[in-house]
Image (tube, grey):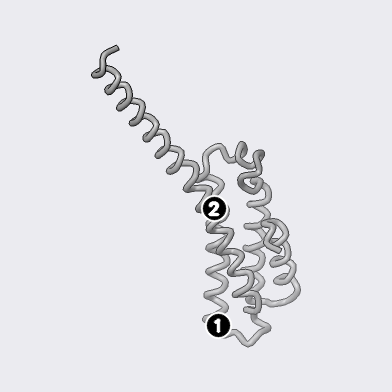
Amino acid sequence: MNSLETAALTAFFGVLVFVLGQFVQKFILEPIQEQRKVIAEIAFVLVFLRNVSKGSISTEEELHEANATIRRLAAQLRATLWTIPLYGVFARLRIVPERKAIFEASKALIGWSNSIYSGGISIAENIKMVEQILHLE
């Protein structure tokens, strides 16, 4: 093999490795990172909006904003199930939470957002459930 062939093969395999690396980054690592960002935002909201409810001294605007924020996070969390390819494989490897846990956490977030207007014990129960499911305690 002459030096021109060696250079061509080196360039080809260099480009191949680069393309495969970009594929893994864009289609696997970035969606997993996005899910972790959503979970981190949920952890923030669990503390920041914990005291917002009809029974507290929150305004209607604060209630509406909290409701929308919590529901948006529930939807974003659920959407991560479809942005991560081979989700079941990554869940079995414990790289991402199990599918069932994501659905349960999303359901508890929606329950929390629904109970903001009525207040009551269900807010605390839903918050506790989200913390336990996503291991945020």
Position of residue 94 relative to residue 114, above or below, is above
Q: Are marks 2 and 1 in contact (CB under 8 Å)?
A: no
Q: In the image, residue 18 lies at what x, y percent?
A: 37, 35
Q: Residue at x 64, y 81 (%)?
A: 54
The amino acid sitting under disc 2 is Gln
Identify the residue at horizontal 73%, vertical 71% (top origin). 124
Is 133 on the left or on the right of 34, as rendered?
right
List x then y, in percent, for residue 49.
61, 75
Q: Quickly name the residue at label 2.
A: 35
Give the tally of numbered discs: 2
Residue at the far bottom: name it.
57
Q: Residue furthest front?
A: 3
Query: Which corner quadrant holds the C terminus?
Result: bottom right
Q: Amino acid at mark 1?
A: Glu
**Closest to the observer, 65 or 35:** 35
**Element type where label 1 sits in the image:** helix
Q: Is residue 50 above or below residue 59?
A: above
Discs 2/1, front: 2
Alpha carbon distance from label 2 to label 1: 30 Å
| Residue at figure coordinates x 30%, y 12% from the top left | 1
Dot 2 alpha-carbon crowd within 10 angstroms: few under 14, some 14 to 19, many 20 or more: many
Q: Is residue 26 above or below residue 5?
A: below
* The quadrant where residue 47 appears: bottom right
Give the crowd class for mark 1: few <14, some 14-19, many >=20 residues within 10 Å.
few
Residue 60 is labelled as 1
Residue 53 location, x and y as percent? Answer: 64, 79
Residue 87 is left or right of residue 98, and the answer is left
